[in-house]
Image: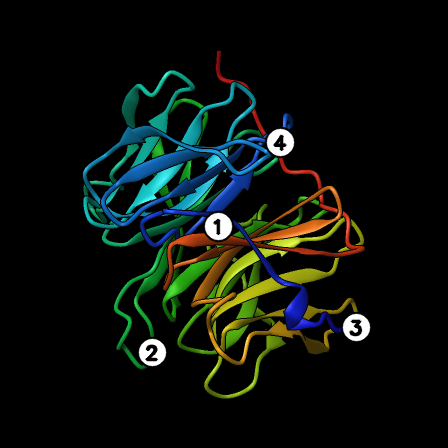
Amino acid sequence: MNLNYSKIESFCEGLDHPESICIDEQGMIYAGGEAGQIYRISPHGKVTLLATTGGFILGLALDGDGAIHACDCAQGKVWKITPDGSISERSSGTPQRPLTIPNHPAFDCDGNMFVTDSGDYWSETGTGCLMRIDRKQQTTLFHEGPFRFANGLAVDPTNRWLYIAQSTAANIVRVPISETNGPIEVMYQLPPGTVPDGLAFAADGQLLIGCYKPDGIFIGRIDGSVELLVEDPTGELLNRPTNIALAEGRIYVANLGGWHISVLKSELLPCPLHRPRFG
């Protein structure tokens, strides 16, 4: 199943280098910007500014109350932004290990939020780790890695595994949710020179992988193979694509190198995400 890049469309424009994207049950789309913007985008592409943290927004996750949980790499924090735009801090790491580059959050079925902390991009062995923020706001170091620039993060459909994109290793690894510092298993190895960024599971267990380089999306098959799903050879419709969201037979893509969200039709159905309610 390869998609023709000519079928890619610009869904909305005027965003400030969006890195992440998530969609609520009403079809409202949320994205971040490099000056700390949190954008709310209607199903028809109308953009409004919900809030601004003053930092640089990377990954986003929605909870069941409609609040956005946002990784701010410039300030080393994870913020919570309520539907009315109020901002509060969820975590800055632990006293022993403050967050340096919080990159992407993901909830499990128990309401724990896991966050990749990328570490040094240029380290040959990696310095990235994985944090866990529980429902009581307690942050712990869940996995010390080291990960080679831990980037996108996704909980698999069985809620047994955390899948992590290692950008500078050109692969996707997984660790068990049930075990602190559990074994790191390579699940998908991408071609040399590929820079994987964002991850999104389809309902059938296949994994979409947004790649900062090349300007395209790979798909990880159930059998462990990897296939290039779509690539934009000109880098205009897909411009340094990062995170991905599936909804209603469409793939929405954030473009860190540009000012727009891309969309393309797909037969893939989204894997339901865990969205805990905090009240």
Q: CA distance from mark 2 to mark 1?
A: 20 Å
User: Mark 4 or mark 2, which is nearer to you?
Assistant: 4
**What's the residue at 70%, 38% (across, down)?**
272
* Disc 2: CA contacts within 10 A as few (<14), some (14-19) or many (>=20): some
Residue positioned most to the bottom: 192
Give the amino acid type for the residue marked by disc 3 in the picture: Asp
- First-in-chain label (2 vs 3): 2
| Residue placed under numbered mark 2 in the picture | 125
Contact? badges 2 and 1 (CB < 8 Å): no
Instruction: Tell me which amino acid carries mark 4.
Output: Gly
Label 4 or label 1, whichever comes before in sequence order: 4
- Residue 255 locus on image (x, y percent): 44, 59
Q: Nearer the viewer, mark 2 or mark 1?
A: 2
Circle 4 residue: 27
**What element does badge 3 sit on?**
loop
Label 4 crowd bin: few (<14), some (14–19), many (20+), radius 10 Å: some
* Disc 1 residue type (three-letter): Thr
Image-quadrant location for residue 5: bottom right
Q: CA distance from mark 1 to mark 3?
A: 27 Å
Instruction: Say which mark, if any, is on residue 180.
Output: 1
Sequence-wise first label, 2 or 1:
2
**Disc 1 or 3, which lies upstream in sequence?**
1
- Disc nearer the start of the sequence (3/4): 4
Give the CA distance from mark 4 to mark 1: 35 Å
**Which of the labelled discs sits on residue 223, or is there none?**
3
